[in-house]
Image (cartoon, rainbow, N blue to C red):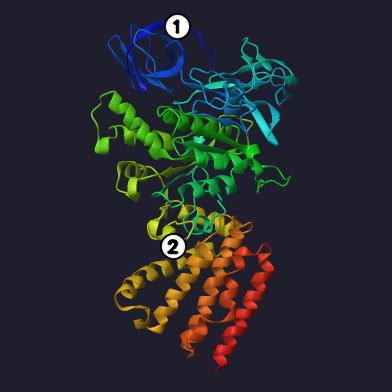
Amino acid sequence: MTDEFTGEGEIYRVSGPVVVAEDLDAQMNDVVRVGEEGLLGEVIQIEQNKNYIQVYEDTTGIRPGEPVKNTGQPLSVELGPGMLGGIYDGLQRPLPDIEEKTGSFIERGVSVPGIDLEKEWDFEARVEEGEEVTEGDVIGVTEEGGREHRILVPPGTSGTVETVREGEYTVEETVVELEDGTEISMKQEWPIREAREVSEKLKPEVPLVTGQRVLDGLFPMSKGGVAAIPGGFGTGKTVTQQQLAKWSDADIIVYIGCGERGNEMTEVLDEFPELEDPWSEEDKKLMERTVLIANTSNMPVAAREASIYTGITIAEYYRDQGYSVALMADSTSRWAEAMREVSARLEEMPGERGYPAYLASRLAEFYERAGRAETLGDNIEDPGSVSVIGAVSPPGGDFTEPVTQNTLRVIETFWALDKDLANKRHFPAISWTDSYSGYAETLQPYFEENVDDEWGKLTRRARNILQEDEKLQETVQLVGKDALPEEQQLTLEIARMIKEFFLQQNAFHDVDTFCEPEKTISILRTILNWGDAAEDAMDAGAMLEDIINVESKQMISNIKFEEEYETFLEEIDEQIEQDFAELGGE
């Protein structure tokens, strides 16, 4: 964003991240430079000759009377090749470039381009002179992160191609010129608060494979879907978010650390550059298709809101190229807390627990920018998608608080983290009783056609067993497990196997950290087959104690740690048959 100013006023009052300027000719959402140091801010309210400005940097030391300059432009991000592998703050300023410019601590008023304006990219044209193009069409490609970065006709632009240039160019140099004189470069700018248009929204019929058995098996999410992960401190939100970022089968990952502790983002920054991309056949690094936005709790509070919109705008840009994008926001609660603080500084009427009355609409606007869609470009074959997964950090794990409740109204998949499961060291600590997926039925045909034709049948059986286990546990609490009939004790044992052998997953194990859908359903089928054989043996007179001590049960517990699991499954099937044949003989 260029700092060409259209007007100037002066500071009237300073209240934390909110600065009031007077005599400034500005409109809502105009970006301004505040004070002698030129702090970045945005006009969020106008009353007569007073402009209320949300400042995205620390306002300590700023005084009334200092100048405020208006750029006349909305808060925007620069879009183009060079973003993948980037690490940004909430305003799309590259942190490595800031460090090089100012040192380890971010100085106020520093301005750094969002993408490298000097690097040259090898532009290969996809259009010819005389060809008609319209907004969203691919005019050429360059290589970025091991994949095509498709250069698109900017929104609102169309015409006949007059000149095409191929070769090495910077993102600001013209690569295509239209007959009407319009020049198109490899860089676009887009206001972060405005959703980018698509041709048509599509149904959520394709799953976002996460590699986490409890999610893919029981509570699946679609590409273009929206999900929330709420949970109190210590329940594993951040690890779950990082697992989703590492292993989801999206083409592009956008990870937003919004208001969380700095050491958590440090862990991400240390791990991601070292991780191999599980979906690449060329031994590429995961970071090559990832954009990281780090806006930690020690950074200015107002910038948390900007980081959320910056991330979703970058995600939409890659969606428009026909890619599937998974966006992780950790956490939306910190964003909501930032809105609450700014609202209080504006002296607005507070809603529940002090949050602004517009909390629900802001959350809805954010999540509604997700979706799977046909892009505007006529020469892009595949639909693009933005899948949004937001972590929620309710104080004390209270799911009745406003951020969680308002999130529940707009999302389709709810992955509830359970404190009791976390205390038992059961991870991921996703509750199978409180969680749900609105995509399960829609995605079932896909899984049955592409993975296993019994997908729906097996996952329904697993849910039914877990529900029955939940009811039986209430009786166990009163009278003890031994007071139950052996048939019900066997049900409890099968449910325990599902919980420990299937739902439990070790994020730090080289093999178990990721489980493809084929392995997921194979493990579940083996457990249920063991349960069927156990019930038949019990009907034939076998004792429960003998049943639960068979060798095949112990072998099932090891499937998830086996890389070559198919052969191991065959051995288990043979062992199940042998174990229960012996019991039946007794």
In which quarter of the view is residue 103 placed?
A: top right
Q: Which residue lies under the disc numbered 1? A: 6
| Secondary element at tag 2 | loop
Q: Is residue 384 visible?
A: no
Q: Residue at x 46, y 87 (%)?
A: 539
Q: Residue at x 42, y 74 (%)?
A: 492
Judged left or right of residue 404, residue 331 is right
Report the mark closest to the observer, 2 or 1. Answer: 2
| Residue 467 coordinates in the image, percent (x, y) | 39, 67
- Residues at discs 2 and 1 in contact (Cβ within 8 Å): no
Q: Is residue 216 visible?
A: yes
Q: Nearer the viewer, residue 480 or 559?
A: 480
Q: Residues within 10 Å of mark 1 (few under 14, many from 20)?
A: some
Q: Tell me, for residue 424, which label it has, or none.
A: 2
Q: Nearer the viewer, residue 74 or 460?
A: 74
Q: Is residue 486 above or below residue 444?
A: below
Judged left or right of residue 376, residue 148 is right
Image quadrant containing the C terminus: bottom right
